[in-house]
Amino acid sequence: MKWFVLGVMLFIEAVIYYQSKSDAAYREKRLFLISVPEYAYDSQEVKELCLGFKKESQRNYFLITLLALPTLFISGMIYLVYLMAWFVLLVIGANFAFRKYRRLLKELKREKQWIVIEDKKMHVDLKLSAYMEKAKTCWYLLAIPLSMDLALFGFGIYYKQTILVATVLIMIMILCVGSYFISRIANQTYTTDTDLNIQLNLARKNSYFMALFYVGCGDACFNLGLLILDKQFIAGLLCLGIAVCFMILMVSGLLSFYRLKERMIRLHEDKFYYQNVDEAWRIGLIGAVYDNPADPRTLIPSPNGMQMIFNAAKPGYRYFMLTVFVVIFVFFGYIFGYPYYLDQHHELAELTLTETTLHVDSPFYEHEWTLTSIEKIEFSDDLGEGFRVNGTDTGVYGKGHYRFDRYGDCEVYLASLHPSYIILYTQDGVYIVNDDEQEKTKAVYEQLVKKVE
Amino acid sequence: MIIELDYESETPIYLQLRNEIVRGIGSGQFKYGETLPAVRTLAKDLQVNTMTVSKAYNLLKQEGYIVTDRRHGAKVCPNRDESDEYRQKLEQEISLIASEAIVKGMDKEDFMTLCQNMLQTISFTSPRLKNQS
């Protein structure tokens, strides 16, 4: 598990590294988000700055990578605290070199008096606007991932898979809100040529739309794969593989517009407009931030050209960020906070013994065993070493397929904060279950022993 | 047709938009009968309120440069105006510009050359004028 977490940490670090490198690159007469004429980019001083940035950036990321390794050797609360501190360091430290070299380039530009004509005017191609009114996207394709998500939603409700239900709802919301925003995205006047503008805007809209489609399909396949993995391993693995393919298609789709734009810039450089408002750009915690109150646009192309980013000066940006944090807070609150609240009020798990059945009931799981199917019962307050193969483990409750050194493969329905467990050996396999009150678990066990024997 | 708007200018946006469209019609970039984008679309692309674009379109309609229709939107359809009232208004505006130019030190011949060069860029002809000629 720690190796897996380390892998995720390094993957996130790699993504931030390549994002930062891409933002800092010379593109559309901007280097480190400073407008620099081409002759200046070819100068010795700028080449030295670029080399210095590359070395310092690589050194910083290498140090951050080394600092991730101790996570393999620590555990418990120290592990969690160290993990959080590492992520904070990554977010803050990742852009140190970018900020430093941006400042140096600004000073160099001032010293050398390099002139880049600042184009602060807004260009709008009216014929482009008129044409794009009639242009249609294949919005009906979104019915495919939406149908898959609705089916998964039904499965999630039926099998009481709370996390699946929550993630599917979030994806449905992303698909609906995303398609709305893509359809309403403002047309961009890239060049003085209307035909070129139409070509680029159509490509941009299609690439964003198809990326949303691939993300929706990929997410649905991923959730389906996880759902069926323990029952139908091959089919589950196939679904996960298809999910990965969709993600690759998504990245390829986004890159296609970027490559088209780069090709058009090479062929028709004199026709392109360049907006060079240096002071509007700054380096935020996680990368480039555009903050220009004089720019009426809410969304502007990111420095690497692959996505749109918010104009932080717009009130809409604050509402958007607030909404994102609220959704994340509500999501994690439901996954972790709500079970904890139930646990504190002894409403998390109810173990009930009748004349013929043993029943465990919770808002997150439910199962019943007939007494005749139970062959042997044990009681334990320590399950020993084990791990989750498939299922849910929020630290407050656990449900699903686990493997313990002492008991082998088991299905568990556990209130995790109350270490009193009943182990049931049945015809269908081994089950581990408990109540959210330790005394009640013990009492049910004693009654169960009498009935089964 | 590409228009330029300066959001930091003191001239209101609707007026800048109106002026740019009139220049576009004059320079022939907008042909007679051509459709302008819908108010919502243009407002979204300009990142301004729909009222701003609506105001510009209403002004153009009042002045006789475009016609608007609920089904077909706004179309370039300038009307001739040879009234004395319009001529008087034009004389006043030209007099102001000419005075500014001369007071600022421009030669009268230079000013005439400038005006002639400007007229060269105006290529608008309405179908009615074509038929008459």
Image (cartoon, coloured by chain):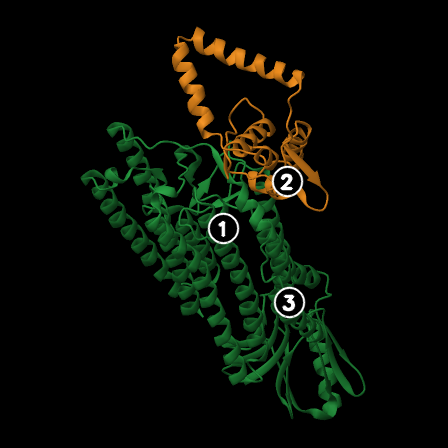
Chain colours: A green, B orange
Q: Which mark is residue A143?
A: 3
Q: Which dot, 2 or 1, sits closer to the camera?
A: 2
Which of marks 1 and 3 precedes in the sequence? 3
Is B57 positioned to the left or the right of A408 in the image?
right
Give residue B68's position: percent from left, percent from top: 69, 38
Query: Between marks 3 and 1, how big is the CA–CA gap?
Result: 27 Å
Residue type indicated by callout 2? Lys
Instruction: Examine the image and state in which quarter residue A425 appears.
Output: bottom right
- Looking at the rendered image, the quarter that the C terminus of chain A falls into is bottom right
Residue type indicated by callout 1? Ile
Which residue position holds label 1? Answer: A198
- Please tell me how many numbered marks the rendered image carries: 3
* Secondary structure category for the residue under label 3: helix
Q: In the depicted view, which residue is nearer to us: A219 or A190?
A: A190
Q: In the depicted view, which residue is nearer to us: A96 or A426?
A: A96
**Mark 2 belongs to which subunit?**
B
Q: Residue at x 44, y 21 (%)?
A: B116
**Mark 1 belongs to which subunit?**
A
Which residue position holds label 2? Answer: B75
Q: Residues within 10 Å of mark 1 (few under 14, many from 20)?
A: many
- Residue A215's place in the image compared with A104, above or below, is below
Q: Which mark is residue A374?
A: none
Is A350 positioned to the left or the right of B78 in the image?
right
